[in-house]
Structure formats: C-alpha cells, structure tokens
Amino acid sequence: MLLKNIIRKITNWEAWPFKILYAPIAVFWAGYMIRSGAVWFFTPSNPKLTFGGMEGEPKKEMYNLLPKELYPATFNALPSENFSIVKERLHLSGIEYPLIVKPEIGGQGILFRKLDTEEAFMQYHSKVPVEYIVQQMVHYPIEVSVFYIRHPQQAKGMVTGFLHKIPLQVTGDGVHTLEELVAQHPKGNKRIEEMQHKHSKAWNTVLPKSEKYMLSYAANHNRGAHFVDLKNHIDEKLTAIFDKISIDINDFFYGRYDIMCNSIEELKEGKNFSILEFNGCGAEPNHFYDTGYTLLKAYKEILKHWKALYQISKYNRQQGIKPWPLAKGRKFLSDTRRTAAMMKAADRNI
C-alpha cells in the first residue's frame, strides 16, 4: 500500500508542488533572463500592473482599469477600521448577503470566503490581518477562465485557454454524512482536515439526496476545483470580446480573466457576464489541468506562453518601459512573500 501511494504521488504530476512541477523547465526562464539582461524581464509585459502582474499586485489596481459595469460591486476594507464603518460602506455600496471577501493582495483562494450573515462578516473582519475586498456575490451559474495574449503591435489577440471551473463540492445521497462524502471525493479526501475545520457544523450531517454542498467557493486548482476544457468554444466572437476589453483597459497584453457568466453563448455576445478579476503575467495557463494533457504537453504549453511573455516584454522595453531594477524587485518579492506567509497562517484559523 505504501509503495502504491508513493507511485501514485510520483505519477500524478498535476498534484506536484509548484516548484517541483516547474523545476525541469526553469532553464528556459533563466534563458530569457540572460537574453534580456534583466532578472525581472517580464515586468514591462503589462505596464499598468505592479510587477507586470507576476505576483503581489493590488487588486484595486486591476478594478480601477475596468469599467464598473464589468465587475461586481466592490469596496476595500482595513482590519484596523471599526466594523461599524465597514457596515456603513456595505450599505452605501448596495452589496447584500451572501457576499464574497478576499485579500487585496493574494491568490490561490487564500482568505477567500463566502459570507452569509453579518455575524460571519464581523468574525472575518476581526481575524483577517490584511486589507481585504468586499464584493457582491455573482449568481451566474458558470465560472470560466480565459487566458488572453496580444502582442502590442497587433490589433487582435488570441485566447489560448478557455475553461469551465467547478469549485470543490459534493452531492448528498441521503445516506452518507458530509464527512463520509468528503472522504469519498477524489480531491476532497486530500483536504479532510481543512474541510472539517471549515464545515464543522455540518460535518456529521447526512445530506439529502441530490443536494449539492459547496466545500469551497474559490475555483482554484489548488483548492480542489475541477476544470473542464472549453477549447472547442474558442472562436473569433469570443476573442473579439476580450480584444475589446483588453484594448479598453489599455496596456493589458498577457494574462487570465476569471469570469462568471450565464452561458457561453451569451458571453460571446458580450451579455450577462461579470469579471471577478484578471491576473497579469503571473497567471498560470491553467488549462492543462484536469483536461487530458500529458506532462510533456503541459510543458510545451507553458513554454509557448513564456515565449509570448518574453516577446511582449521585449517589445514594450524597446518602447521605453524598463524592467524593474534588481534590488527593487527583490524587496518587493520579499515583502510580498512575507505577507503571503502571514495570510496562509491566518487562513487556517478563519
């Protein structure tokens, strides 16, 4: 049994830690640093995003670039603020329960929560250690991610990845408890301790037959979400939608949009969708997860995106947008990762 588990972990490359997965192709990234003569060669890729959107960029920066009608009602709050002030801002924004909260700087679903009541909101506010975003929950039925690339010299870009993202959930059968259903789930059973902590009130409850129970609202691969490939739906209409959005943003050339929509067809018509957020050059081309890619094909996909990132960054540099200095980038990453470690610790207790 032990040997079988070891073999399963080795062969299941999609579950490898980030550093191990990317280690065999790191030489290509190093090559781009050498060719460009800059460690942070990628920072000119999206000039209006801090660090090109690689890591640690403020989300308010992103929302400020979008027309308000394209994203849910949103405001920022500080943990040092009196909760009564935050409540007043909630009232003025028109945001109603359930609502979403997430850190201003962060990712991977850390400190991302759906809150149903004022009591839950107050508890989150009292424990969260960083500035955070309060956002109206979007009730469209489908969440998708769209990876978009456009070279600055080109009027049209391309959608390189299109996914339906299904957050971690179980379905009741009228027989088994939530604990048992999680233990039977191929991804949930790897997160039992986390799930028990977050769903302690319902942990021993038998779920009615056919009732869906959301274990996480963060549709991230590392939070147990399942991805369905929508590449067959990529066409000129879809690309045109994201050409318009990206050109209107101005200077957004490489990254991934996370979107809620009513249907794929309506998204292509530019109707009934809402942008939850978009991520710059640090966005992973995540369409190789859960979608039948071999490890070799996943590496080819990553390298294709890295090449495009290098070419965009090189061109923007030639237009006068300089990469970040070495010392500035080092300090920024050090500060960002220190904050991320603090948020991960807090995430386990909220």
Image (cartoon, rainbow, N blue to C red):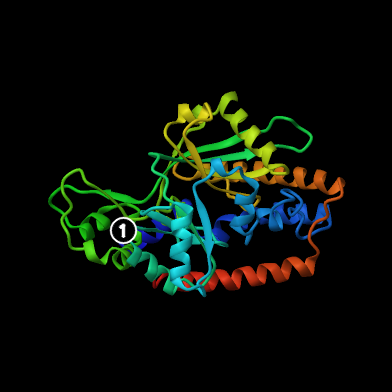
User: Residue 315's spot in the image, x, y percent?
Assistant: 82, 43
- Foreground: 66 or 160? 66
Name the residue rendered at 83%, 49% in the picture: 317
The residue identified by callout 1 is 189
What residue lies at 52% left-to-right and 42% top-to-bottom?
287
Q: What is the x, y in percent for residue 234?
A: 54, 29
The residue nearer to you, when weighing 16 against 262, is 262
Residue 3 drawn at (x, y percent): 36, 62
In the depicted view, which residue is nearer to us: 26 or 279?
A: 279
Quadrant containing the N terminus in the rendered view:
bottom left
Q: Residue furthest left?
A: 175
The quadrant of the picture occupied by the C terminus is: bottom left
Above or below residue 82? Residue 135 is above
Instruction: Tell me which corner region of the image, top left, top right, bottom left or bottom right, holds residue 196.
Output: bottom left
Placement of 94 over or under 301, stated as above or below: below
Q: Amino acid at mark 1?
A: Asn
Looking at the image, can residue 15 be seen? no
